[in-house]
């Protein structure tokens, strides 16, 4: 087996993660809500994990509320690290300027992410380098939601699960 490598901002992982389970998610959630500052944000569980956790490799978490940049980056990074280090699961944590939802009409969503690109096994798999760097580990990017892949699935009749507010 080839050596595994994943880099997202300051986080580097050298072992493949496992598919997420509800048990591990609930354990992670308890740890995540202990991070200082999380209580200032609404925390949303969304994405494929809600529909079928056996058919996804990550858990999508969206934070909403007024961003406090100095704490927001630390919250997103620490939450992601907890996922990797304690549960061997990938958590994709972002901040959005609006509640996460899959609207039938496209709209621009402002996201705050903690890296400008994600690298997996030597390949850039996500590129936000067109975003505006706002601090050492934060970028603001604007994206059309639903994205083209999601929109195509919607046109084919796929119904995305509604986000769940966790707090």
Image (spheres, rainbow, N blue to C red):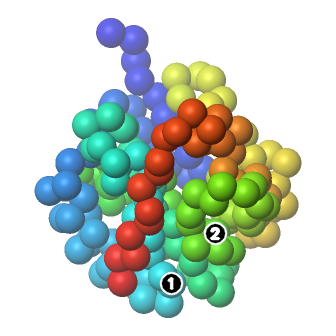
Say what secondary structure mark 2 lies in: strand
Q: Picture quarter containing residue 139?
A: bottom right
Along the line of sight, the residue nearer the viewer: 64 or 128: 64
- Residue at the left extreme? 23
Say what secondary structure mark 1 lies in: loop
* Residue that numbered label 2 is attached to: 96
Question: Residue at image x 25%, y 37%?
Answer: 54
Q: Picture quarter containing residue 83?
A: bottom left
* Residue that numbered label 1 is attached to: 41
- Specify whether residue 82 is in view: yes
52 to 50, vertically: above or below: above
Q: Measuring from the top left, give residue 59's x and y in whole percent.
A: 38, 51
Along the line of sight, the residue nearer the viewer: 160 or 126: 160
Q: Measuring from the top left, give residue 150's x and y in whole percent.
A: 60, 41
56 to 136, vertically: above or below: above
Q: Quadrant of the N terminus?
A: top left
Side (left or right) of 21 relative to 42: left
Side (left or right) of 62 relative to 89: right
Question: Residue at image x 80%, y 46%?
Answer: 129
Question: Residue at image x 41%, y 24%?
Answer: 4
Q: Measuring from the top left, give residue 67's x and y in whole percent.
A: 65, 82
**Would you call the spot at circle 2 few (<14 residues within 10 Å), some (14-19), or many (20 or more)?**
many
Question: Residue at image x 28%, y 69%?
Answer: 29
Q: Which mark is residue 156?
A: none
Q: Quadrant of the C terminus?
A: bottom left
**Would you call the spot at circle 1 few (<14 residues within 10 Å), some (14-19), or many (20 or more)?**
some
- Specify whether residue 78 is in view: no
Question: Which numbered disc flags the more N-terminal residue, 1 or 2?
Answer: 1
Q: Measuring from the top left, give residue 135's x and y in whole percent.
A: 74, 69
Side (left or right) of 12 relative to 142: left
Side (left or right) of 70 relative to 43: right
């Amino acid at each position: 087996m080839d050596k595994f490598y994943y880099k997202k901002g300051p986080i580097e992982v050298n072992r493949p993660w496992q598919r997420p389970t509800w048990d591990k998610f609930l354990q992670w959630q308890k740890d995540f809500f202990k991070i200082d500052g999380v209580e200032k944000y609404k925390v949303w569980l969304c994405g494929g994990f809600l529909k079928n956790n056996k058919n996804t490799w990550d858990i999508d978490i969206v934070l909403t509320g007024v961003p406090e940049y100095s704490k927001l980056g630390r919250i997103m990074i620490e939450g992601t690290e907890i996922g990797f280090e304690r549960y061997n699961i990938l958590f994709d944590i972002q901040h959005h300027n609006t509640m996460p939802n899959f609207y039938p009409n496209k709209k621009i969503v402002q996201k705050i992410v903690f890296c400008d690109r994600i690298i997996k096994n030597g390949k850039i798999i996500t590129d936000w380098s067109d975003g505006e760097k706002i601090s050492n580990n934060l970028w603001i990017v604007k994206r059309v939601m639903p994205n083209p892949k999601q929109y195509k699935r919607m046109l084919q009749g796929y119904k995305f699960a509604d986000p769940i507010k966790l707090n």
